Image (spheres, rainbow, N blue to C red):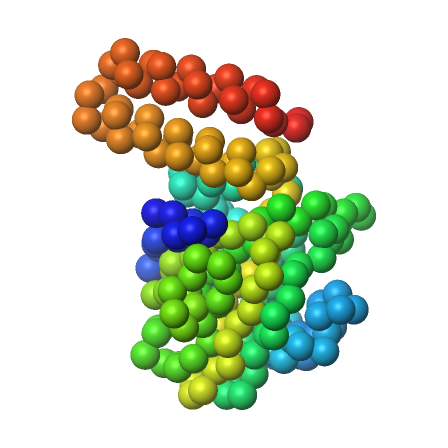
């Protein structure tokens, strides 16, 4: 479901995937997260990022879950994705107001960061604070159950509010979409949802065919491949 400019994706990770990632988090070592921030954001980024044995397998777990998620594919229209980072915020840690770097390293090249994604990994009752705040977010920011995620334009100013108790753990990464403009992606996502609702109710009806035609032709107009 959409909330302002963000899309909430439920149950991205199944129970087995979530347990694998939580096991990795429990044994991971941690380093200062400011090392991966742009020069303008380092002064406001106060968190930790996981490293060590098992991180490649953890990243693959996230990638496999996303590959089968229809809503993620429809909302992001991904062309390329950054490396998945696993972040931890302990009491007092936060990420102040910032905008993500427009270009980010990926392999030997770079990607344009059209979208950012946060997948929450620990139980809501295990920490307080730490909401992801951006335009359209609820008061206190997004705080979602483990395995749920929020997909949002990287063009927005956003922040992670201070964690008060416990630890907030999440997987974060960035996406270059085949459709550059936020408004165009939103239109395509709305049409994709509408055609699914029509198909579930009516099957391959004339209304479904018309919506499908509009979706396909707009994608042809806007896509960069």
Return the residue found at the far left: 201
Residue 84 visible, this orientation: yes
Residue 19 visible, this orientation: no
Residue 152, image x, y percentages: 51, 52
Nearer to me, 148 or 95: 95
- Residue 5 position (above or below residue 130): above
Residue 108 appears left or right of 218: right
Q: Quadrant of the C terminus?
A: top right
Nearer to me, 137 or 208: 137
Residue 36, image x, y percentages: 72, 67
The quadrant holding residue 120 is: bottom left
Nearer to me, 70 or 4: 4
- Residue 215 position (above or below residue 114): above
Identified at 34% across, 74% down, the residue is 124
Return the residue found at the far top: 206
The quadrant holding residue 15 is: bottom left
Nearer to me, 198 or 15: 198
Identified at 65% across, 61% down, the residue is 99
Residue 123, image x, y percentages: 35, 73
Residue 59, image x, y percentages: 56, 57
């Amino acid at each position: 479901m959409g909330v302002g400019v963000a899309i909430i994706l439920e149950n991205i990770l199944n129970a087995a995937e979530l347990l694998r990632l939580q096991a990795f988090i429990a044994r991971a070592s941690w380093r200062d997260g400011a090392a991966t921030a742009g020069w303008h954001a380092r002064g406001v980024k106060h968190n930790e990022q996981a490293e060590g044995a098992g991180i490649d397998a953890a990243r693959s777990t996230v990638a496999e879950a996303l590959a089968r998620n229809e809503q993620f594919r429809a909302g992001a229209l991904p062309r390329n994705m950054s490396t998945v980072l696993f972040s931890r915020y302990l009491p007092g840690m936060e990420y102040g107001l910032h905008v993500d770097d427009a270009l980010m390293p990926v392999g030997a090249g770079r990607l344009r960061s059209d979208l950012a994604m946060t997948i929450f990994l620990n139980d809501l009752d295990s920490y307080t604070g730490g909401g992801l705040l951006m335009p359209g977010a609820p008061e206190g920011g997004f705080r979602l159950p483990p395995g749920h995620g929020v997909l949002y334009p990287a063009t927005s100013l956003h922040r992670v509010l201070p964690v008060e108790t416990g630890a907030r753990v999440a997987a974060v990464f960035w996406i270059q979409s085949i459709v550059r403009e936020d408004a165009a992606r939103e239109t395509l996502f709305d049409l994709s949802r509408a055609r699914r609702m029509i198909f579930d109710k009516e099957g391959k009806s004339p209304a479904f065919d018309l919506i499908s035609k509009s979706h396909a032709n707009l994608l042809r107009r806007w896509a960069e491949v």
